[in-house]
């Protein structure tokens, strides 16, 4: 049991268990995807989880698949939780699921496109002020460090930002997460969040997936869908031909 508590004491190891809970049977490469850590560090964390019997592995050809083993967690629950607090905790758990369902019910927009370019070039196109101005009509301005502010500024010389937010996560050429709101906008549930996930497919193609979450309602979802479809189509044309569409779709 000591090994279990030691394994659970680290936030990265808990995140790995969460990812296996969401999608069991992942390879090391899949588990590393989206984590700003080296493969060696992730391997060490997985070794501690295996030693605590929280993760089991099996081979599929040359791949090693990792599976969440819930038995030690169940033993903790039975020993210290269930027999003392079962009725009250079940009620709280039901309330938590209801609240999470209400939050997840908010509309989100997801768009995936395939671009003939390298991940570095797509990343540059998303974060470079000059390139974003060329195909987006606005300049994305930030130092792109987690916690830093970012602005979506007009290119008419006014310096006005139509969208502002914070950089939540930035892994160059892999993943960018930003909050998204109009300046001074009052959003009781907080700003929406935009995630850019870049996945290389071979040497010359990138799968770019954009997820816009925490949208207020269906009207805002329709607005996001129209805007992102136009912007990402123009981005793809710009990177593949060297120039944006002659008539931007949002004109």
Image: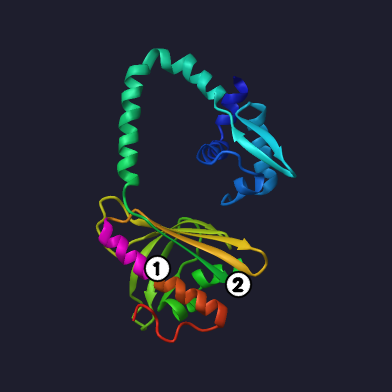
The residue lying furthest to the right in this view is: 62
Mark linked to residue 71? none
Mark closer to the chain start, 2 or 1: 2
Mark 1 lies on residue: 228
User: At x 58% / y 29%, what residue is drawn?
Assistant: 69
Assess disc 2: are there few (<14), some (14-19) or many (≥20) residues with their C-alpha within 10 Å of its C-alpha. some
Check the image and tell me how it is coloured: rainbow
Quarter in which the C terminus is drawn: bottom left
Front position in the image: 235 or 131: 235
Quarter in which the N terminus is drawn: top right
Residue 176 x/y as whole percent? 50, 59
Mark 2 lies on residue: 117
The residue lying furthest to the bottom in this view is: 246
Above/below status of 191 relative to 41: below
Residue 83 x/y as whole percent? 41, 12
User: At x 24% / y 57%, what residue is drawn?
Assistant: 186
User: At x 43% / y 18%, what residue is drawn?
Assistant: 81
Main secondary structure found in the magenta portion: helix
> Going by the image, does 227 lie left or right of 54?
left
Q: Secondary structure at mark 2?
A: loop
Total count of labels: 2
Residue 68 x/y as whole percent? 58, 33
Assess disc 1: are there few (<14), some (14-19) or many (≥20) residues with their C-alpha within 10 Å of its C-alpha. some
Question: Per the image, is 226 magenta?
Answer: yes
Residue 184 x/y as whole percent? 27, 62
The residue lying furthest to the top in this view is: 83
Above/below status of 215 relative to 86: below
Residues drawn in magenta:
217-227
């Amino acid at each position: 049991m000591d090994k279990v508590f030691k394994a659970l004491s680290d936030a990265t190891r808990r995140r790995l268990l969460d990812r296996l809970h969401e999608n069991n049977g992942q390879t090391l490469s899949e588990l590393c995807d989206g984590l700003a850590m080296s493969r060696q560090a992730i391997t060490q964390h997985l070794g501690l989880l295996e030693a605590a019997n929280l993760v089991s592995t099996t081979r599929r050809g040359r791949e090693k698949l990792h599976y969440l083993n819930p038995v030690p967690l169940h033993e903790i629950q039975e020993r210290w939780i269930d027999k003392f607090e079962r009725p009250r905790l079940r009620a709280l758990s039901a309330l938590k699921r209801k609240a999470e369902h209400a939050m997840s019910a908010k509309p989100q927009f997801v768009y995936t496109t395939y671009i003939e370019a390298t991940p570095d070039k797509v990343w540059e196109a998303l974060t470079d002020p000059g390139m974003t101005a060329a195909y987006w009509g606005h300049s994305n301005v930030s130092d792109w460090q987690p916690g830093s502010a970012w602005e979506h500024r007009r290119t008419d010389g006014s310096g006005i930002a139509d969208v502002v937010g914070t950089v939540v996560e930035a892994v160059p050429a892999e993943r960018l997460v930003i909050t998204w709101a109009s300046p001074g906008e009052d959003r009781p549930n907080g700003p929406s969040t935009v995630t850019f996930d870049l996945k290389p497919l071979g040497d010359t193609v990138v799968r770019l997936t954009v997820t816009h979450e925490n949208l207020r309602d269906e009207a805002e979802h329709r607005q996001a869908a129209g805007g992102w479809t136009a912007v990402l189509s123009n981005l793809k044309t710009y990177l593949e031909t060297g120039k944006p569409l002659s008539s931007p779709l949002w004109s």
